Structures are given as C-alpha cells and as structure tokens.
Amino acid sequence: MTVIDPHMRNLAGPPDTARSFAVPVRVYFQDTDAGGVVYHARYLDFFERCRMEWLRSLDIVSTTLVADTGVLFVVRSLDIEYLKPARLDDALDVDLRLEALGGVQLMLRQSVRRGDETLVTARVQLAAVSAAGMKPSRLPPELRARLAAWLPSEPDRERP
C-alpha cells in the first residue's frame, strides 16, 4: 500500500484488476438517524467525497477542470445496495475502482467497508458535460489518458 497522505490511500489491486482508491470516513452524529444508524442518503456523500479525492489525487480539481476545459462531471446513474448498517463513531473506508471509460462516460464501482465487512456497494455512472449548457461533452484527451490508467485489464473491461 502506498500512502498518499493520512486521509487518502491509493491501493494497488491484484495484478489482473484496476487499482483502487480509498478514503477513511468517521461516522459523526449528523450522519445518523435517531437510532445511531447511518442515514441511507449519507452514503452518497461518502461516495462523492471519495470520488472528489480520487480526482484530486490525479491532479484533477473540479474548479480547475471547469475553468481549463469547460467540462464537469455529473452523476448520470446510481445503483446502490445496502448490505449492513454503519453506526455512530464507526471508522469506515470508502473506496472506488474505475470499471469502464467511454468518450463521455465512466463507470465506477464504489463500496463502504468497516474493516473486512462490506456495508454498502454502488455502481456510479458519471458523464462529462459542458459547464455552460449541461450537454454531454467528450472527455479532453489528457483527462481521458489520466483516467484510463485506472482501468482494469482488457478482458475485464466493459464500455458504459
């Protein structure tokens, strides 16, 4: 495991899979319902935080991306499965793997783990859109090349 900083980890996956990126998250009171269980919508925030830090680790900052290319990412679809609850004060790891990369879209697999337990999994499809008109926009070649380095090996790859 290569440590980027205490808050982000860039994990090398098994040789035949894409690399994975993870951020630690602590469950605070505002993340929970009256029973101390993480409210279902908070996982979306955890996933978003992981995606933003992953992009930042690739030197892709949203505000700079828009200023330099006129492109931004939006969530196009989300398929989420809640397996086990997280609770107040849990230490979690939120991770992602890039599954597929197209000209405009990318597909991510994300999960929330507590130790070895997987609590929540999701497939998140992002689309690049123009900031001005919110219309689909092809990924700039340099950006696409940075993202492509995170793809799984060819036989495992699918296109969104």
Image: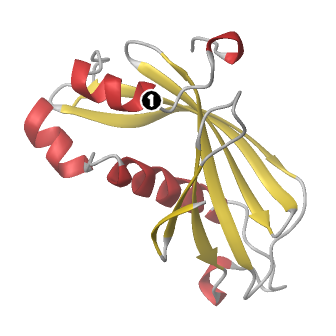
Residue 151 in percent (x, y) is at 54, 26
Q: Which residue is located at x 77 percent, y 62 percent?
A: 113
What amino acid is found at the position of numbered circle 1 in the picture? Ala
Residue 125 left/right relative to 122: left
The quadrant in which the C terminus is found is: top right
Name the residue: 78% across, 54% down. Answer: 120
Q: Quadrant of residue 27?
A: bottom right
Q: Secondary structure at mark 1?
A: loop
In this image, 28 relative to 133: left or right? right
Q: Is residue 94 above or below residue 141?
A: below
The answer to whether residue 7 of the structure is visible from this angle is yes
Residue labelled with disc 1: 149
Count neighbours of disc 1 (C-alpha within 10 A) and say few if under 14, some if 14 to 19, many if 20 or more: few
| Labels in figure, total | 1
Q: Nearer the viewer, residue 121 or 13?
A: 13
In the rendered image, residue 46, in percent from the top left (x then y), is placed at 58, 62
| Image coordinates for residue 41, horizontal then vertical, percent | 65, 60
Q: Position of residue 82 (x, y in %)?
A: 83, 53
* Residue beneath the point at 64% across and 15% down: 157
Task: Name the quadrant containing residue 35.
Answer: bottom right
Q: Where is the N terminus found, in terms of image quarters?
A: bottom right
Taking the image as shown, residue 40 lies to the left or right of residue 94, namely right
Colour pattern = secondary structure
- Residue 140 in view in this figure: no
Which residue is at the far left? 68
